[in-house]
Image (tube, rainbow, N blue to C red):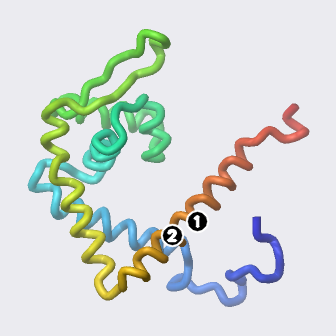
Amino acid sequence: MRRDSTRFYKPDSYQREESLGWLLKRAMANIVHQGDRRLTPLGLTHAQWSPLLRLRLSGPAPAATLAAELDIDAGATTRLLDRLQAKGLIQRERTLEDRRVVMVSLTEAGQEATAGVPLVLADIYNDLLTGFSDAECRTFISLLQRLVANGEALRALDRAPTDESI
């Protein structure tokens, strides 16, 4: 990773308004706020539409995978899935290969409930990108993908065994 004198952020000139973390958090807060405002009439909060959309776009997943992707602990995941199951939006089944693994999938009602979510999110993202050219949008997405890849690489380093742990 980048550990030389060309580092962008410097402690003596750090400003919140230029902080990557603060800017990303504010952008995400705006997305969540708009999503909740526009999806609440459909009976979905961010805590609900986010995992439902993941299941809609990528198919069934183990509960543990959803927890990791949503960055929430197992207890919070269980409570969330309990609520979604009570609403009839998901179903959970233990796998035959490993009874500890609980697969989560959308029900027909879950498919119907999430049908409008991609349209709403596309509208939100387009509204947030007002004034950006097509080329700027593509560059912005490419840069964010690189940022995510760098973050994933750091996570992989954190998980890698060290000589001391062997």
Callout 2 crowding tier (Cα within 10 Å): few <14, some 14–19, many ≥20: few
Determine the secondary structure under disc 1: helix
Judged from this view, the residue extending furthest toward the left is 41
Image x and y of residue 136, in percent? 43, 82
The C terminus is located in which quarter?
A: top right
Q: Amino acid at mark 1?
A: Arg
Instruction: Kindly identify which numbered label has been placed on residue 82.
Output: none
Identify whether 35 is placed above or below 109: below
Instruction: Kindly identify which numbered label has been placed on residue 146.
Output: 1
Q: Amino acid at mark 2?
A: Ser
Determine the secondary structure under disc 2: helix
Count of numbered circles in the view: 2
Whether residue 17 sits left or right of residue 120 in the image: it is right
Identify residue for label 2.
Answer: 142
Residue at 50%, 74% in the rendered image: 22
- Tell me whether circle 1 and circle 2 mark residues in contact (CB < 8 Å): yes
Callout 1 crowding tier (Cα within 10 Å): few <14, some 14–19, many ≥20: few
Residue at 90%, 39% in the rendered image: 163
